[in-house]
Structures are given as structure tokens and as C-alpha cells.
Image (cartoon, grey):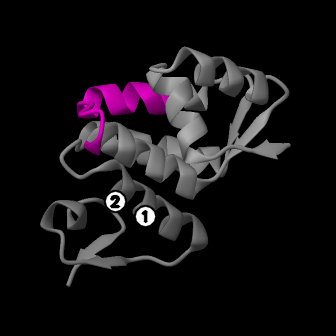
Amino acid sequence: MRAVDTNLLVRLLVRDDERQVAAAESYVAKGGWVSQLVLAETIWVLDAVYYRTPAQLAKALELLLNHSSLALQDADVVELALKSFRAKPGLGFSDCMVLEIARKAGHLPLGTFDKQLSKLPGAALV
């Protein structure tokens, strides 16, 4: 399966350049793999550049998880991070991903100075 870069994934979600959207759709039609890093970068771009709300970010993640042609790296981790992000949208999705990646790897607690993140199971305020 071919990998997908951040800018291609952003085009699929934002759909702001007709030519690039068509090229991106054609590329992923045969299947595309999305790494955790590309996913985190994509959510950051949607937030910082396109000013998407936490609810819109969650919807984008849900669309990617359910996309017929895309496979997300460790989709189970992404689903758990999305659940935490929906419960505490002020955290930011990447914080939720870091916690769930640590959980899957068996390396808890996750030490943090972030008071909000430390309230989630598996995180510890340092």
C-alpha cells in the first residue's frame, strides 16, 4: 500500500484546490496508508491554518477512520485518542495520541506538566 503525505491528506479534507483534490483522490483510490505523524500534522494544519473547531477536527478524524481507501497506522490507537479528544477537546488531539501510543506500548504513566492531560487515566502530573 502506498503512503500518503500531509499535504495530500489536507487536500482530501479541505478540498480547496480542484486539481489537487482530483489528483489526491486518484492516488488513494488504490489504497493509501496514513502514518501517525502525518495524521497529527494534518490535524495541526486543519487547526492552525484552516481554523477548524475541535468538533470539526473530530469529524475529520472520523471521516479518515471510516474512509474506504485509507488505512490509518494503529487505527485502534487513533480511535481511543479520538474518544479522549471528544471528551476533552481543550487538550488537543496530539496530546491524546501521545497518551494512547504510550498506553499501547505499555509505557504508562505518561509524565506531563499539562494539568488537563494529567487528568486522563494513564497520565501523571509531574
Q: Amino acid at mark 1?
A: Val
Q: Which residues are magenta?
A: 48-62
Q: Magenta part mainly helix, strand or loop?
A: helix
**Marks 2 and 1, how far apart at CA:** 5 Å
Q: Residue at image x 23%, y 31%?
A: 53
Q: Residue at image x 37%, y 31%?
A: 58
- Give the structural element (helix, strand or loop) at label 1: helix
Dot label at residue 87? none
Left or right side of 13 for 8:
right
**Is label 2 in contact with label 1 (beta carbons under 8 Å)?**
yes
Q: Is residue 55 within the magenta segment?
A: yes
Marks counted in the figure total 2
- Please determine whether, in this image, residue 23 is positioned above or below residue 89: above
Q: Residue at image x 68%, y 43%?
A: 4
- Please determine whether, in this image, residue 66 is positioned above or below residue 88: above
The residue nearer to you, when weighing 124 against 29, is 29
The x and y percentages for residue 49 are: 29, 40
The x and y percentages for residue 29 are: 79, 22
Q: Quadrant of the N terminus?
A: top right
Dot label at residue 98? 1
The x and y percentages for residue 10 are: 50, 34
**Residue density around tag 2, few if under 14, some if 14–19, many if 20 or more, within 10 Å:** some
Residue placed under numbered mark 2 in the picture:
95
Quadrant of residue 96 within the rendered picture: bottom left
Quadrant of residue 9 within the rendered picture: top right
Q: Quadrant of the C terminus?
A: bottom left
The x and y percentages for residue 110 are: 37, 75
- Give the structural element (helix, strand or loop) at label 2: helix
Q: Amino acid at mark 2?
A: Asp
